[in-house]
Every structure is written in structure tokens, then in C-alpha cells.
Amino acid sequence: MDSSSIKKLVEDELACGDSFTNSHGVTPANIRSLLVEPFAVPTNPDDLETQSRNMWVVLQERPTPTDGYVVVYDPATQDWGVAEHTGDGGYTLVVSSSSLAQALSDM
């Protein structure tokens, strides 16, 4: 997968119009301003079994990806998730969800 195919997945998810409630200030009105050009980051799935793998950051809670949470897409599982920066250049998956809207609600 590349950045353009991830962007298409994000657009497809947004086109579904699924509602979400987010306690971090992400709303349907401002979500597009928080989307970023997708980029891959090493992410620990935090399941005690699976090695870190690249997941794609698609949304940043704050302008710098090392502050706050990010929403990621995992091509290995085809799931969405919320991850946090670990300080060593990587991220740890905090929650995994079946849709972008569910990941935003779980944030």
C-alpha cells in the first residue's frame, strides 16, 4: 500500500457518514483539518505476541505527531486504531477498531 491508497480508504470511510463521538475535540465539522498526508510509522500492536509493524498515520490530534494521539490504519489486519507516541520514534497501538468512526469514538 502507498499513501494514495490509504487516502482513498480514508475518503471511503468518511463517505460512509458514520457518526462518532470524540472526547478529544474531533468532530465531523473539523475532521478534515486534522487529516494528514498518510505516512507509515513503526507501531507496536501491544498484544504481547506480534512484533512492531508499519501502520499508517491518517489523523493527528495535534500538529506534531509526537504530541497527543494519532489515528492509524493497519494494512496487516485492515483495522483502524488509535496510537500514542512512545518517545523512541515508534508508536503503541492503544485501541483497535473495525472502522475509522469507531476508532474516533474510542479515542
Image (cartoon, rainbow, N blue to C red):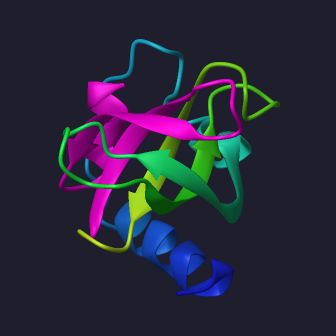
For residue 43, say whether it is visible.
yes
Q: Is residue 96 left or right of residue 93?
A: left
In the rendered image, the quadrant that contains the C terminus is: top left
- The image position of residue 15, as x and y in percent, is 39, 68
92 in magenta = yes
- The image position of residue 40, as x and y in percent, is 63, 63
Q: Is residue 29 left or right of residue 89?
A: left
The residue stretch that appears in magenta: 78-107
Q: Residue at x 18, y 55 (%)?
A: 98
103 lies above or below 26: below
Q: Residue at x 29, y 29 (%)?
A: 105
Q: Where on the picture, by quarter, is residue 92?
A: top left
87 lies above or below 41: above
For residue 28, say whether it is visible.
no
Residue at the top extreme?
A: 23
Q: Residue at x 36, y 65 (%)?
A: 13
- The image position of residue 59, as x and y in percent, is 60, 45
Q: Where on the picture, by quarter, is residue 12?
A: bottom left
- Is 23 in front, or is 45? 45
